[in-house]
């Protein structure tokens, strides 16, 4: 029968070197808090229970832990008297019948830790008679770590930096802080820990000498990938671990068939999902729960947070949040997709376009210089350049509906709430305040009128007036200039050629 596993996560320390209002373990790396990464690894070993020891800023840390692991137990350590004291606090928070099996102790600030490594460590421990096992690593600079002192039967002691002799300081095998205990041994050892050491703390690491005093053995499991056990204590280490995590995430996606043209300038969060043959061009950030479909091309220079990008879509120099881009659709360059944007299959959100809470139908296009807020745009519709969906009357937001295959002209304003029917059209410069019936052409700008020789009269003495006068003279000589005089015009004139783009 597999052993019951209890995971204890230590996260009560202050993390003062972060110099932050935010508790150390809550600082994010790759879109998740550091402790979020650790909890993910912990859950991967399928423990019977998880206990988090919280202290400093527990009003932030506690709810965060229970959000990620709803049945986690929180043990409050009022004063931080050392790792041994922290584990004792967790132990006392457990019901007596839960103090059984194997106890895995980990710390909340090692974001690169992987569930697989914990699994391998626990398998190692389970295959021995050791009272406890230590996940150790061999490091170039062991300063600050507890050193692993070995003898012929295994590990004899862990000696902390401040308590170590010269000879012990030279040992380069270190305690990662990740330990596995036989529960019965731990139960007996915790009350025997003292704080008679250089730091005046209850060291969890003293359990090693207690085990040996009891005639038990202690094992060490050396992890090759020691960075998995590294903690971020300050912002420089946070950045270094963040870069390493990003490198690992990109490596994994490239092995899954994603092209990353420039890994150095590409950032992908841990929870992002990418399909095969996605291409990420330089300067791309994919954040949160973003998902990208097969053959899509993202970038260069795009940031997408919690977005869903369909297969074969192209997103160029765009910023998006909580937006959905359909298969084969195109976005940008220079587009801002705000929450609630849903672009249909083969649709287009073009250059200098901002969208928000907008459903844009299949094949519909908003190609140039527009704001589309609180809108439904039907299949195959085309929105002219420079169109503003005026959704806000100063008090409330209203919706605009554009029918299927409607063609609206350049420089329109749609004053919501308003509906433009299927197959309808508008004239350039229209300000649409009333619903337009299906198939109708709506024109709101007045007929064009000319006030002859206005420049010569009202701007006399200027370069403008001179240019106008020279042109008039030339036209008298050649008699081939366009006719002057008031122009009644027709509403239809100029409509067709003012429909923007395709
Ligand atoms: C500890 C180990 C050391 C190991 C190192 C690995 C001990 C005595 N030493 O040293 O052998 O090499 O980790 O990083 O265990 N914590 C609490 N409550 C406390 C004290 C600590 O929750 O009262 C938490 C901290 O928030 C941190 C972790 O325990 O996450 C480790 O504590 P820390 O004080 O950093 O121990 P180290 O001195 O680094
Ligand atoms: Ca530490």
Image (cartoon, rainbow, N blue to C red):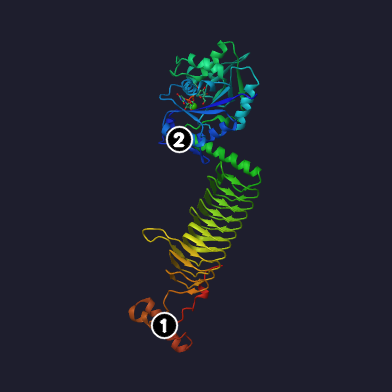
Question: In the image, residue 333 lies at what x, y percent?
Answer: 53, 58
Number of residues whose C-alpha sits closer than 10 Å to that of mark 1, classed few (under 14), some (14–19) or many (20 or more): few
Residue 295's disc is: none
Q: Badge 2 is on which residue? A: 63
Number of callouts = 2
Q: CA distance from mark 1 to mark 2?
A: 78 Å
Nearer the observer: mark 1 or 2; the answer is 2
Disc 1 secondary structure class: helix
For ligand 1, tell me if the residue under mark 2 lies within 8 Å. Answer: no
Residue 312, quarter of picture: bottom right
Marks 1 and 2, the one that precedes in the sequence: 2
Residue 470's disc is: 1
Disc 2 secondary structure class: helix
Q: Residue at x 59, y 30 (%)?
A: 46
For the residue pair 260 and 272, the one nearer the viewer reads as 272
Q: Is residue 111 visible?
A: no
Number of residues whose C-alpha sits closer than 10 Å to that of mark 2, classed few (under 14), some (14–19) or many (20 or more): few
Q: Residue at x 53, y 31 (%)?
A: 110
Residue 413, quarter of picture: bottom left
For the residue pair 178 and 232, the one nearer the viewer reads as 178
Question: In the image, residue 198 lies at what x, y percent?
Answer: 45, 17
Q: Is residue 440 visible?
A: yes
Residue 363, quarter of picture: bottom right
Q: Residue at x 47, y 24 (%)?
A: 93
Residue 318's place in the image compared with 479, above or below, is: above
Question: In the image, residue 113 lies at what x, y percent?
Answer: 57, 32
């Amino acid at each position: 029968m597999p052993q019951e596993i209890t995971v204890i996560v230590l996260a009560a320390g202050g993390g003062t070197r972060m110099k932050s209002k935010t508790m150390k373990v809550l600082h994010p790396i790759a879109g998740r808090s550091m402790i979020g990464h650790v909890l993910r690894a912990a859950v991967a070993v399928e423990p019977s229970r998880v206990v988090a020891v919280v202290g400093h800023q527990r009003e932030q840390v506690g709810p965060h832990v229970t959000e990620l692991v709803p049945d986690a137990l929180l043990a409050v350590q009022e004063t931080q008297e050392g790792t041994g004291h922290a584990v004792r606090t967790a132990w006392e928070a457990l019901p007596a019948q839960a103090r059984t099996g194997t106890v895995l102790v980990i710390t909340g600030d090692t974001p690169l830790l992987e569930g697989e490594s914990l699994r391998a460590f626990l398998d190692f421990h389970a295959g021995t008679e050791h009272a406890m096992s230590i996940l150790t690593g061999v490091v170039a600079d062991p300063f600050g770590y507890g050193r692993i002192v070995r003898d012929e039967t295994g590990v004899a002691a862990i000696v902390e930096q401040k308590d170590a002799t010269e000879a012990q300081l030279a040992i380069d095998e270190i305690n990662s802080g990740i330990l596995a205990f036989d529960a019965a041994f731990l139960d007996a050892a915790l009350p025997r820990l003292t704080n008679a050491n250089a730091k005046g703390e209850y060291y969890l690491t003293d359990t090693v000498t207690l085990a040996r005093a009891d005639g038990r053995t202690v094992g060490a499991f050396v992890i090759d990938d020691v960075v998995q056990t590294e903690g971020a204590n300050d912002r420089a280490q946070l950045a270094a671990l963040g870069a390493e995590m990003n490198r690992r995430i990109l490596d994994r996606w490239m092995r899954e068939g994603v092209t990353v043209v420039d890994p150095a300038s590409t950032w992908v969060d841990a929870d992002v999902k990418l399909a095969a043959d996605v291409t990420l061009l330089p300067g791309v950030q994919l954040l949160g729960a973003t998902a990208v479909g097969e053959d899509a091309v993202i970038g260069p220079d795009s940031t997408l947070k919690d977005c869903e990008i369909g297969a074969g879509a192209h997103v160029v120099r765009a910023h998006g949040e909580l937006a959905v881009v359909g298969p084969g659709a195109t976005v940008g360059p220079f587009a801002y997709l705000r929450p609630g944007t849903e672009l249909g299959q083969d649709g287009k959100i073009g250059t200098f376009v901002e969208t928000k809470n907008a459903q844009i139908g299949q094949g519909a296009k908003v190609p140039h210089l527009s704001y589309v807020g609180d809108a439904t745009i039907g299949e195959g519709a085309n929105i002219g350049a420079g169109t503003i969906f005026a959704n806000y009357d100063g008090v409330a937001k209203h919706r605009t509906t554009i029918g299927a295959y409607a063609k609206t002209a350049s420089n329109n304003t749609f004053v919501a709430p308003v509906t433009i029917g299927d197959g309808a059209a508008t004239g350039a410069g229209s300000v649409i305040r009333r619903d337009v019936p299906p198939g109708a052409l709506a024109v709101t700008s007045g007929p064009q009128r000319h006030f002859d020789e206005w420049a010569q009269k009202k701007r006399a003495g200027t370069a403008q007036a001179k240019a106008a006068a020279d042109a008039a003279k030339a036209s008298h000589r050649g008699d081939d200039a366009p006719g002057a005089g008031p122009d009644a015009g027709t509403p239809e004139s100029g409509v067709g050629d003012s429909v923007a783009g395709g």
